[in-house]
Image: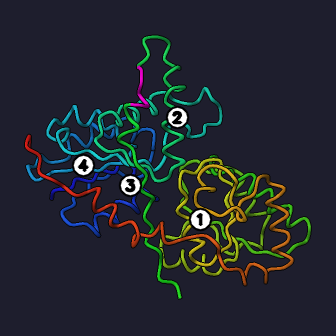
């Protein structure tokens, strides 16, 4: 097995990516930890993997998401430190939203910066993700009271590239950072106006679920078609194919797999004119305020035929595995190194 894949948070899009790579690429071996207690995975997974990944002379390349502290792993396991190391960013901790600024733990972002310095190649799933990370490094290190490191952006940037998250689209013939309050507030307003609609709220449930979810489910009552996590991907896509509109109210999004999957299944997307969305969706699918979102949904409720006849004007192909597999194969091509 020449490609060693490590995923410290094996769930959601992180799981989707490494499962796809292991299935589609030859000579891969995968080591994971369950997608629970993210903060502890970021703090301690390197030590766990250092003790649980067998020593092998066959490894030539290491691919890991940025949850892993790559610096610690390379120090604890010099044999792995010698490999070509590729770090993939699903999200970055320099601009990841927190409820209060003082809640931001400096160490998470600092670990990602260190991991970039150790990595040979740093890959981001969007230009927004890459630029928001790189351009925040200077401000971030100013939090250090004295003896600050210098020129980190200029050191890291040459290693960086963007390779969109590869989606294996189906054959059709998911916390406070997603801002559920705004989403449900808009739906309540539609209900107060007496407009007819149905809603499906899909996604994994983690430890802390905002109260607004349970309260809204009760208030929306018979308007709810589906609620919660659908373990079967086929069932999930079936629900998407039944829907007319897919809405994001996210305050944090570095890519947005679920939105693209829904659009592929025929949904009309409505996304904030912010974050990664302008990079992926044409302007007509973006809104600037909750009021704009509400007005558009009101119109759709009154005239559902408008969206049912609509043909999506954006591009889906660039985000497909079919289009991206060549880039990933090139990225994960292992060339023998003289020092191994």
Q: CA distance from mark 1 to mark 4?
A: 30 Å
Q: Which residues are magenta?
A: 150-154
Q: Earlier in the sequence, mark 1 or mark 2?
A: 2
Q: Residue at x 65, y 52 (%)?
A: 250
Q: Which mark is residue 62?
A: 4
| Numbered disc in front, either 2 or 3 | 2
Q: Earlier in the sequence, mark 1 or mark 3?
A: 3
Do the CB atoms of the residues marked 1 and 2 lie less than 8 Å apart?
A: no
Quick check: 125 left or right of 304? left
Q: Position of residue 145 (x, y in %)?
A: 50, 12
**What is the crowding at mark 1: few (fewer than 14 residues within 10 Å), some, or many (at least 20)?**
many
**Residue named by callout 3:** 10
Do the CB atoms of the residues marked 1 and 3 lie less than 8 Å apart?
A: no
Q: Which mark is residue 259?
A: 1
Looking at this rendering, what residue extends furthest in the top direction? 146
Q: CA distance from mark 2 to mark 4?
A: 26 Å
Quick check: 330 left or right of 139? left
| Numbered disc in front, either 1 or 2 | 2
**Residue named by callout 2:** 135
Q: Position of residue 306 (x, y in %)?
A: 78, 80
Q: Position of residue 232 (x, y in %)?
A: 47, 74
Do the CB atoms of the residues marked 1 and 4 lie less than 8 Å apart?
A: no
Q: Earlier in the sequence, mark 2 or mark 3?
A: 3
| Numbered disc in front, either 4 or 3 | 4
């Amino acid at each position: 097995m020449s490609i060693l894949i490590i995923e410290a948070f094996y769930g959601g899009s992180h799981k989707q990516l490494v499962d796809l790579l292991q299935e589609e690429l030859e000579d891969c071996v995968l080591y994971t930890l369950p997608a629970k207690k993210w903060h502890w995975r970021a703090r301690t997974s390197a030590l766990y993997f250092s003790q649980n990944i067998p020593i092998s002379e066959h490894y030539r390349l290491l691919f890991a998401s940025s949850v892993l502290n790559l610096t610690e792993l390379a120090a604890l396991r010099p044999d792995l430190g010698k490999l070509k190391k590729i770090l993939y960013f699903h999200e970055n901790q320099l601009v990841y939203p927190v409820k209060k600024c003082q809640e931001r733990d400096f160490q998470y972002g600092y670990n990602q910066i260190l991991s970039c310095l150790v990595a040979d190649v740093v890959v981001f799933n969007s230009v927004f993700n890459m630029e928001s990370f790189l351009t925040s490094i200077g401000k971030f290190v100013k939090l250090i009271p004295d003896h600050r490191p210098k020129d980190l952006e200029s050191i890291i940037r040459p290693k960086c590239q963007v390779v969109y998250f590869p989606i294996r689209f189906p054959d059709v013939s998911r916390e406070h950072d997603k801002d559920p309050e705004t989403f449900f507030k808009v739906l309540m307003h539609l209900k107060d106006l007496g407009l007819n609609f149905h809603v499906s709220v899909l996604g994994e449930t983690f430890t802390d679920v905002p109260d607004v979810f349970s309260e809204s489910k009760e208030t929306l009552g018979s308007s709810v078609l589906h609620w919660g996590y659908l373990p079967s991907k086929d069932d999930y896509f079936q629900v998407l194919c039944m829907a007319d509109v897919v809405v994001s109210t996210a305050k944090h999004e570095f890519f947005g797999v679920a939105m693209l999957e829904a659009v592929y299944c025929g949904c009309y997307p409505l996304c904030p004119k912010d974050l990664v969305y302008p990079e992926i969706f044409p302007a007509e699918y973006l809104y600037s305020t909750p009021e704009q979102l509400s007005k558009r949904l009101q119109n759709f409720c009154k005239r559902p035929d408008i969206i049912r006849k609509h043909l999506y004007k954006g591009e889906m192909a660039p985000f497909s595995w079919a289009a991206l597999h060549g880039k990933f194969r090139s990225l994960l091509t292992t060339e023998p190194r003289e020092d191994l």
